Image (cartoon, grey):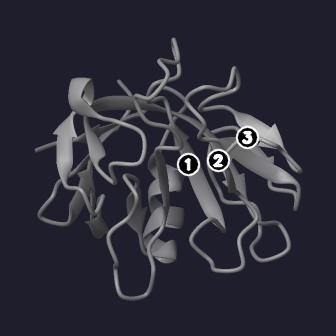
Amino acid sequence: MSPKFTATPSGKFSGPGFTARCVLGKGGVVAASQKREGDGASPAGIWPVRNVFFRADRIDPPVTSLPLVPLKPYDGWCDDPAHRLYNRPVSLPFAASHEKMWRDDHVYDVVVELGYNDDPVEAGRGSAIFLHVARPNYEPTEGCIALDLSDLLAVLELMEPDSEIEISF
């Protein structure tokens, strides 16, 4: 059985033999059925891990058995509920609303895509829910889970392709 990890609103991210500080969304944690695009909330539930995106110009490829995807300056993620590519990676420039994955800050130096609202995608139910690098002051996210870079790299070594992350109330 693959390791399962849990993130809590109290700031604890844990799994088998692993515990670290984390931060969740500025809107708190909401039931996935209540999650809406732009609400800043983290969706409660158990979410599979998908791909690991990373900035090869800033860090070495993380040690993990998860699929690795080097980020490029033109990578984005569609967050426009009206667009057919909602909650999907896109190439920039992109006319619809989107997030830039290639950021000036370091929060997306390593990004783990979570399988939230992706099978199937439901318009307006939230997009770009990731596990990524925390800001130095652990400022709340827009709905993601964030860890210190060293903790994120350590947990990636423990994750397997069928690992899951639970965001709990």
- x and y percentages locating residue 129 in the rendered image: 46, 44
Contact check, label 1 and label 3, Cβ < 8 Å: no
Residue toward you, 55 or 144: 144
Mark 2: secondary structure: strand
- Disc 1/disc 3 C-alpha distance (Å): 23 Å
Identity of the amino acid at label 3? Ala
Quarter of the image with the N terminus in it: top left
At horizontal 33% and vertical 48% (from top left) the residue drawn is 39
The CA distance from mark 2 to mark 3 is 24 Å
Depicted 57 relative to depicted 37: above or below: below
Q: Residue at x 83, y 66 (%)?
A: 56
Up/down of 3 relative to 107, above or below: above
**Residue 106: x, y in percent?**
62, 77
Marks 2 & 3, CB-CB < 8 Å contact: no
114 sits to left or right of 73 = left
**Mark 1–mark 2 distance (CA, rounded to whole Å):** 4 Å
Q: Nearer the viewer, mark 2 or mark 3?
A: 3
Residue 63 position in % (x across, y down): 65, 56
Q: Which residue is mark 2?
A: 52
Q: Is residue 89 above or below residue 117?
A: below
- How many residues crowd mark 2 within 10 Å: few (<14), some (14–19), many (20+)? many
According to the picture, the residue beneath numbered tag 3 turns out to be 96
Mark number displayed over residue 160:
none
- Residue for point 67% across, 48% down: 98
Circle 1 is placed at which residue position?
112
N-terminal-most mark, 1 or 2: 2
The amino acid beneath tag 1 is Val
- Residue at 87% x, 57% y is 72
The amino acid beneath tag 2 is Val
Q: CB under 8 Å between callouts 1 and 2? A: yes
